[in-house]
Image (cartoon, rainbow, N blue to C red):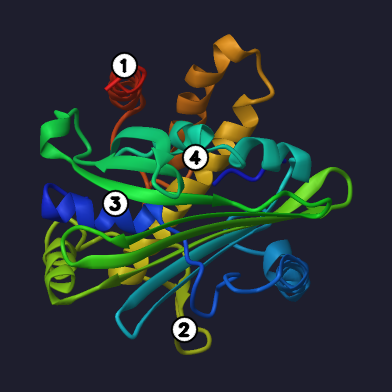
């Protein structure tokens, strides 16, 4: 079994950008830690999560975590995937591949990887869940940092100091470590800060379009009571983290196909994966998604 993985103007942007980014700081961080220690920490997480990975609502070895405290929103997906570490490294250790991954998200309208003043950068345009002219989207420029892959550990980071609509300190970390039988343990995490403007934007979204939406983790409650899924800001974080996790695994699955078939397979893989979680992730029908993304991919392949 293979483990699968902002609103308009201010609203679309604030929610979607939350998704794109993964934390290198805070309690879920690998930043500032030597690669050997970071690899050991990730393996310790895997050992500590054995019970949750073995039995959960996903019916696969996958855990979703989130936190919202001290002005910083954080989230992560931890999962066992049926891909070797070499396959994971080949997929994520290339900024162009990240654009192939990010464009699968319904709110990503365009992505380009280009040299920047201090290395490679990834520019992501975020917009509505419908076709949109890039003039009306907001770009986020992420610095891309790839740590040399090791025999048992991969670490990729993206970060942006400034973000739109009252957000800042975006950071992405994708870690993976090798497991037996050609599998890997993967951790996708993200974090970003919000100021008062960003909080107001999120509150507006949560009072309108996001009012009835839920995440994946269960809110602690009275023993024996019916489980309640998290909502609010943590729900936003969890939904978007999962969308990008599914984008990564859809990319990995498509890499097994002939090159001419991969792009369409990524799209189909992503929308099918989101259909498994209708309460959290389903936003449009398959045909609408495919038509929109084919047009956006064609635009992305046009030099700008």
Query: Are the residues at dot 4 and dot 1 in contact (C-beta closer than 8 Å)?
Result: no
Q: How crowded is mark 3: few (under 14 residues within 10 Å), some or many (20 or more)?
A: many
Q: Can residue 104 be seen in this view?
A: no
Which residue has dot 2 on it?
Answer: 220
Which residue is label 4 attached to? Answer: 247
Q: Residues within 10 Å of mark 2 (few under 14, many from 20)?
A: few
Q: Which of marks 4 and 1 is in front?
A: 1
Closer to the chain start, of discs 4 and 3, is 3
Q: Which of 229 and 259 is in front in this view?
A: 259
Neighbor class of circle 1 (other Cα within 10 Å; few <14, some 14-19, many 20+) is few
Disc number placed over residue 302 in the picture, else none? 1
Determine whether the residue tagged by mark 3 lies in a helix, strand or loop: helix
Q: For the residues marked 3 and 2, what is the alpha-carbon distance in whole angstroms?
A: 27 Å
- Which image quarter is the N terminus in? top right
Label 1: state its secondary structure: loop
Marks 1 and 3 sit apart, C-alpha to C-alpha, by 24 Å
Residue plotted at (88% across, 51% down): 180
Mark 3 sits on what residue?
A: 16
Above or below, 99 against 210 in this view is above
Q: Is residue 68 visible?
A: yes
Q: Distance between the residues labelled 2 and 4?
A: 29 Å
What's the CA distance linking mark 4 and mark 1? 22 Å
Secondary structure at numbered mark 2: loop
* Quarter-of-image position of residue 155: bottom right
- Toward the right, the furthest residue is 181
The numbered mark, 2 or 1, whose residue comes first in the sequence reads 2
Q: Earlier in the sequence, mark 1 or mark 3?
A: 3
């Amino acid at each position: 079994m293979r483990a699968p993985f902002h609103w308009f103007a201010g609203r679309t942007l604030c929610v979607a950008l939350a998704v794109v980014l993964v934390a290198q700081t805070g309690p879920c961080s690998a930043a500032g830690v030597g690669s050997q220690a970071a690899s050991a920490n990730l393996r310790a997480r895997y050992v500590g999560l054995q019970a949750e990975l073995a039995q959960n609502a996903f019916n696969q070895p996958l855990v979703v975590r989130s936190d919202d405290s001290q002005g910083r929103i954080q989230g992560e997906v931890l999962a066992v995937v049926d891909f070797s570490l070499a396959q994971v490294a080949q997929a994520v250790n290339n900024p162009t591949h990240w654009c192939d991954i990010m464009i699968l998200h319904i709110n990503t309208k365009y992505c380009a990887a280009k040299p920047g003043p201090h290395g490679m950068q990834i520019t992501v345009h975020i917009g509505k869940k419908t076709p949109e002219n890039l003039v009306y989207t907001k770009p986020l420029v992420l610095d891309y940092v790839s740590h040399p892959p090791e025999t048992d550990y991969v670490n990729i980071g993206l970060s942006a100091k400034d973000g739109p609509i009252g957000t800042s300190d975006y950071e992405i970390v994708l870690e993976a470590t090798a497991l037996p039988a050609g599998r890997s343990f993967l951790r996708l995490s993200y974090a970003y800060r919000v100021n008062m403007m960003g909080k107001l934007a999120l509150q507006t979204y949560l009072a309108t379009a996001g009012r009835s939406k839920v995440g994946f983790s269960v809110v602690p409650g009275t023993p024996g009571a019916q489980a309640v899924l998290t909502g609010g800001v943590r729900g936003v974080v969890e939904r978007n983290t999962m969308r990008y996790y599914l984008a990564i695994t859809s990319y990995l699955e498509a890499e097994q196909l002939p090159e001419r078939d991969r792009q369409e397979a990524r799209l189909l893989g992503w929308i099918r994966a989101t259909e498994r979680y209708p309460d959290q992730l389903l936003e449009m029908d398959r045909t609408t998604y495919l038509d929109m993304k084919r047009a956006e991919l064609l635009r992305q392949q046009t030099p700008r």
